[in-house]
Amino acid sequence: MFNKLRKDSYVIGILMGVIVPAICFGILYCILALLIHFKPDMLVNKPNLMKTILPKFVLIGIIPSVLLLRYYLLNLKYDKTGRGILISTFVIGIIFAILQFTL
């Protein structure tokens, strides 16, 4: 399976650029859900907690994508895969801006 990730392809880059931040977002969201489940008094003072934190989780989810971009561009010299990761990172950044300024 890991041999398929060692290709220089736009599609692989876009898929990895979407899947890695989605996994990071899911982990952060699960941690927040567990905190709220075990400490429900967190929501007493902050009724709009989900509206303020979810856009920030999207932005934090970009960090592993940037590290992956650096690995593919500098270590492996896969330009097409790096460009695919960069495109998906920009799209996620635009989604963050939309969520941040509309909510």
Image: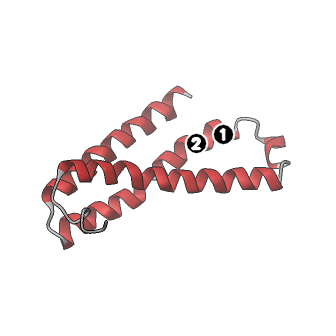
Real-space Cα separation, disc 2 to disc 1, in angstroms: 6 Å
Residue 28 image position (x, y, % from top left): 59, 55
Q: What residue type is labelled 1?
A: Met
Colouring scheme, one of rainbow, by chain, secondary structure, one colour: secondary structure
Q: Indicate left or right for 66 with 33 as reference.
A: left
Residue 74, placed above or below residue 39: below
The percent position of residue 69, horizontal first and vertical second, equals 27, 60
Where residue 53 sits in the image (x, y, percent)?
A: 61, 44
**Disc 1: which residue:** 50
In the image, farthest residue toward the top? 102
Tell me the residue at 18%/70% (across/down).
76
Identify the element where label 1 is drawn: helix
- Residue 40 image point, x, y percent: 84, 48
Residue that label 2 marks: 54
State the quadrant of the N terminus. bottom left
At x 26%, y 65%, the residue is 70
Q: Which amino acid is tagged 2?
A: Leu
Using the image as rendered, state which of residue 52 and residue 73 is in the foreground: 73
Taking depth in this image into account, of 22 and 7 the one nearest to the observer is 7
Residue at 73 percent across and 55 percent down: it is 34
Vertical comparison of 54 with 85: above or below: above
Local packing at callout 2 (Cα closer than 10 Å; few below 14, some 14-19, many 20+) is some
Q: Which residue is drawn at 84% across and 42% down?
A: 44
Note whether 96 is above or below 10 in the view shown.
above
Instruction: Look at the numbered discs 2 and 1 and tell me whether their residues touch, using CB distance below 8 Å.
Output: yes
Secondary structure of the residue carrying tag 2 is helix
Q: In which quarter of the image is the C terminus?
A: top right
15 lies left or right of 38: left
Compared across the picture, whether 32 is left or right of 56 comes to right
